[in-house]
Amino acid sequence: MRWLVDGYNVIRRSPELKAREVESLEGGRRALLHLIARARRALQDEFTIVFDGARLSGGTPPVAGRIRVVFSRPPLTADDDLMRLARQLRNGAIVVSSDRKVQDAARRAGSAVLTAEQFLEALDVPETPGADRPDMKDASEDEPAREKRGNPRRLSKKAKQAQRALGRLRQP
């Protein structure tokens, strides 16, 4: 299984990682790599962490074991690269991003999707207070609710995919 992680999106959802990023972008990236390296030890999965912008020489290493770091090349963004990788890997990927556009594209490709908050919670990292911004209306809330069909106690396909992905992270 390949994990596709929206690097800066995850960094900015954790107070610890965000504090390291304030010191330097490189510090934030290294802290995220260290966190993922700890999680990867228990898994046989591969991780691809995608960041916006070009890599500076001597910066974050592009490869570290089964962890690969990718920097998007302008005019593309990390979101564009994540969506492209999700389309290539289809249901062999778990996409970690809180960006709605990336989540929707990954779901259309058949990938499992986790928010940055779910990912950090599974790794036991405290999230930024108010990161999910419950007071802000979501664009989909403007649409009238559709009548739902089927068993209301049964999880949806995307919820099951997310639960399986979280279970992989939480395994000892």
Image (cartoon, helix red, strand yellow):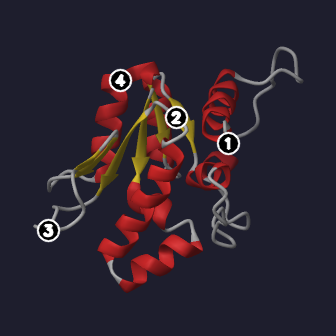
Callout in the foreground (3, 1): 3
Q: Amino acid at mark 2?
A: Leu
- Which residue is labeled 3 in the image? 58
* Left or right of 131 on screen, residue 43: left
Q: Amino acid at mark 1?
A: Glu
Query: Which numbered tag is attached to residue 47?
Result: none
Residue 172 at x, y = what percent?
67, 39
Residue drawn 51% across the image and 47% down it: 100
Are circles 2 and 3 on residues that touch, CB within 8 Å? no
Q: CA distance from mark 4 to mark 2?
A: 19 Å
- Which residue is labeled 2 in the image? 43
Residue drawn 72% across the image and 23% down it: 156
**Residue pushed farthest left?**
57
Callout in the foreground (4, 2): 2
106 or 37, which is in the foreground? Answer: 37
Q: Amino acid at mark 3?
A: Gly
Query: Which numbered tag is attached to residue 143?
Result: 1
Residue drawn 40% across the image and 76% down it: 21
Nearest to N terminus: mark 2 or mark 1: 2
Are circles 4 and 2 on residues that touch, CB within 8 Å? no
Callout in the foreground (1, 4): 4
Residue 163 at x, y = what percent?
69, 32
The kind of secondary structure element at disc 2 is loop
The kind of secondary structure element at disc 4 is helix
The kind of secondary structure element at disc 1 is loop
- Which residue is labeled 4 in the image? 89
Residue 111 at x, y = what percent?
48, 27
